[in-house]
Amino acid sequence: MDIRQLEYFLAVVEHGGVNRAAGHLHVAQASLSQGIRQLERELKLSLFHRTGRNLVLNPAGQLLVEPARKVLDDLLAAQDIMRGARELQVGSITIGTMPEMSSEAVAAWSGSFTRLHPDIRIDLSEFASAADLCDEVLAGQYELGFTTFPVPTDNLETVQLGVQRLLLVRPPGTPADDAGAPFDLAHLAEVPLVTSSSAVRENDIVATALRRASVVPRISARVPNRHAQLTLVLNGAASAFLPLRMATAAHRLGARVTETRPAIRTPFGIVHRPGALNPAAKSFVIQTHADLARWNSLIDAHRQSGASLLRAALLADDELHARIVGDRPRP
């Protein structure tokens, strides 16, 4: 018995005869009839009542219908899986992100993906606004877009990944707060700040939080990007609000990182065009979910043990880095 024989059998059943089945499959009627007879010989059973040119299922044939359908469905599913596996071996994924998301975070998730799929190229670009990013994703120029929410369109699918925390990052040597307590935003009026002109949405979020605390921020510098922000902070010129992942990197370089009261948070995630993603992009989304879940789980565990958010993030990063190094093949 082979797959083609089962396909012929089901075609006759579903199309009500040899003529229509042969036309549907684009094969000669003689070939289809021969395939059916060969199947019956191998099973040592007749599957149809033959009345002139008509074929009508007999009880044995009725028993074969569902098993035959299952075999063909399973085969198609296996072919789809293997096709996806082949497509995951080569190609590229175009990804857009925003300054608010921190390209470092998306680059970290990209690194995790490329370790598993080294032959897939990641093309990562940064956009100045959520509107520009969404327009490019809608136009098909980018398969995935990482952004804070909400987004300015209802025409894209959204995948929420989590909530981003912004921490206050101050120059090295800044006196430590009492007992590591959060910095009260009401006291921020005298703190010089450096903002990124490209992080428009983040600036609005911070401005809203300060306005609620009745604070007029003292903006001492406005620079083009995150790296320039961090450079000014590390050189003692000003403080900045940075995402948790970047704040941990700043801490390792000597900056003073503090949580704020109230906390500044914003949801974030992925946008893509409606419909199924290609296998590589879908795998990237799944891998990003897994990486974030692992990181957040470690942070939560350390926080339950009494660690601050920053300390928990530092420990989580160290543990994940140790795992990556441990998983690398040895020469």
Image (cartoon, rainbow, N blue to C red):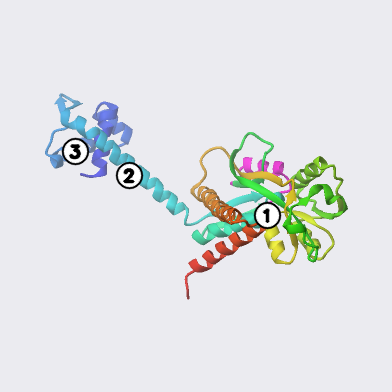
The spot of residue 297 in percent (x, y) is: 55, 53
Marks 2 and 3, Cα distance to the nearest angstrom?
A: 23 Å
The mark that comes first in sequence, 1 or 3, is 3
* Residue 260 within the segment the image draws in magenta: no
Rendered position, 41 above or below 89: above
The spot of residue 165 in percent (x, y) is: 68, 49
Amino acid type, callout 3: Gln
Q: Quadrant of residue 23?
A: top left
The mark that comes first in sequence, 2 or 3, is 3
Q: Residue 29, can we see it?
A: no
Q: Which residue is mark 2?
A: 75
* Residue 142 within the segment the image draws in magenta: yes
Q: Residue at x 74, y 48 (%)?
A: 128
Q: Residue at x 59, y 42 (%)?
A: 160
Task: Tally the marks.
Answer: 3
Which one is closest to the eye, mark 2 or mark 3?
2
Marks 1 and 2, Cα distance to the nearest angstrom?
A: 47 Å
Q: Which residue is mark 1?
A: 244
- In front here: 92 or 17? 92
Kindly indicate whether the residue at mark 3 contacts the one at mark 2 (C-beta within 8 angstroms): no
Rendered position, 90 above or below 263: below
SS assignment at label 3: helix
| Rendered image: mark on residue 60 | none
Please give the range of residues in magenta.
Answer: 126-143
